[in-house]
């Protein structure tokens, strides 16, 4: 199992550019999430999905779009990059059963700089 | 929404000492409380978690306690070692599984340094 994979590892964008951060998992997990990590602020939820075709907003969704066409993939799109989106982005996945939530497995992260 | 406060923000101990990190949460419906360890430049990794029907859980040198009445939970690391140095995050969630996704709300993190 590769677990949760993310590409690219590093990215530099200019203000106004768009791009897609890729995330894939091979554990057949229903839940997938995107977080951003900024110094002193922990991890904040951007968007999440409870299964293919179902997505919803997290704590800081503005400026980002997601889609989930397959169980494995959950790409994050930056529509028009801004310097405030400079951050480290983590994708995570987890499974669940009725009545319980379980460990979230994180990808290696993407370090994004917006100039 | 849920709010998780974590203290202290930095913690420095000598090797062999114990370390305690505390978190409080605001949503009484939260029922799942994981702790993650993140080494420099790496991804967060789960080290222990506890559910609301349990008051304490141990795994070797690591233990977590939960006080639902006071809405706080703590991480205890005994006999600390230099390799325990990392950033530790607490989190809280009110997920019930299935399509009831429990959003994880994270604390701000604690930088633990263990001096040899």
Image (spheres, coloured by chain):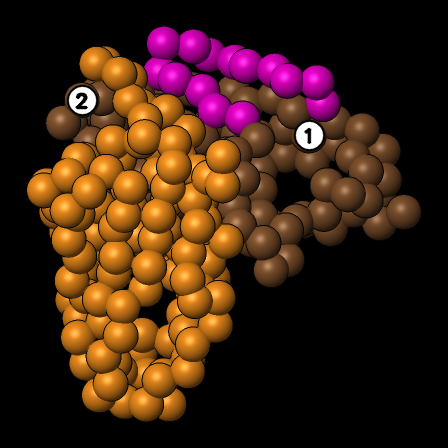
Chain colours: A orange, B brown
Question: What residue appears at the point 49 percent right and 41 percent down from the top-left corner?
Answer: A2
Residue at the spot 54% in from the left edge and 26% down from the top edge: B48
Q: Quadrant for residue A6, please give it.
A: bottom left
Residue B110 visible? The answer is no
- Mark 2 vs mark 1: same chain? yes
Image height of B66 relative to A50, above or below: above
Quarter-of-image position of residue A70:
top left
Q: Helix, strand or loop at disc 1?
A: strand
Residue at numbered disc 2: B98
* A88 in the magenta segment: no
Depth check, mark 2 against mark 1: the one in front is 2
Residue B53 % position (x, y): 36, 9
**Residue B104 horizontal/vertical position (percent):** 31, 39
Which residues fall within the magenta stretch? B48-61
Q: Chain of mark 2?
A: B
User: Which residue corresponds to mark 1?
Assistant: B77
Direction from residue B115 to residue B2 in the image, left or right: left
Mark 1 chain: B
């Amino acid at each position: 199992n590769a677990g949760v994979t993310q590409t690219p590892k590093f990215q530099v964008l200019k203000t106004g550019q768009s791009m897609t951060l890729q995330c894939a998992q091979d554990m057949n997990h229903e839940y997938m999430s995107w977080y951003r990590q900024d110094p002193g602020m922990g991890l904040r939820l951007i968007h999440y999905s409870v299964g293919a075709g179902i997505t919803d907003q997290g704590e800081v969704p503005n400026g980002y779009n997601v889609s989930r066409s397959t169980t494995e993939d959950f790409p994050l799109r930056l529509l028009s990059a801004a310097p405030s989106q400079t951050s480290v982005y983590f994708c995570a996945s987890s499974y669940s059963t009725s009545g319980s939530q379980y460990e979230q497995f994180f990808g290696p992260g993407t370090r994004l700089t917006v100039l | 929404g849920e709010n998780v406060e974590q203290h202290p923000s930095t913690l420095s101990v000598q090797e062999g000492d114990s370390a305690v990190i505390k978190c409080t949460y605001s949503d009484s419906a939260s029922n799942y409380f994981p702790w993650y360890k993140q080494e420099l430049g790496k991804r967060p990794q789960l080290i222990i978690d506890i559910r609301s029907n349990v008051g304490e859980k141990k795994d070797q040198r690591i233990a977590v306690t939960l006080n639902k009445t006071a809405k706080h939970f703590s991480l205890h690391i005994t006999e600390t070692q230099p390799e325990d140095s990392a950033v530790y995050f607490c989190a809280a969630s009110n997920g019930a599984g299935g399509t009831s996704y429990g959003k994880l709300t994270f604390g701000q993190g604690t930088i633990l340094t263990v001096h040899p």
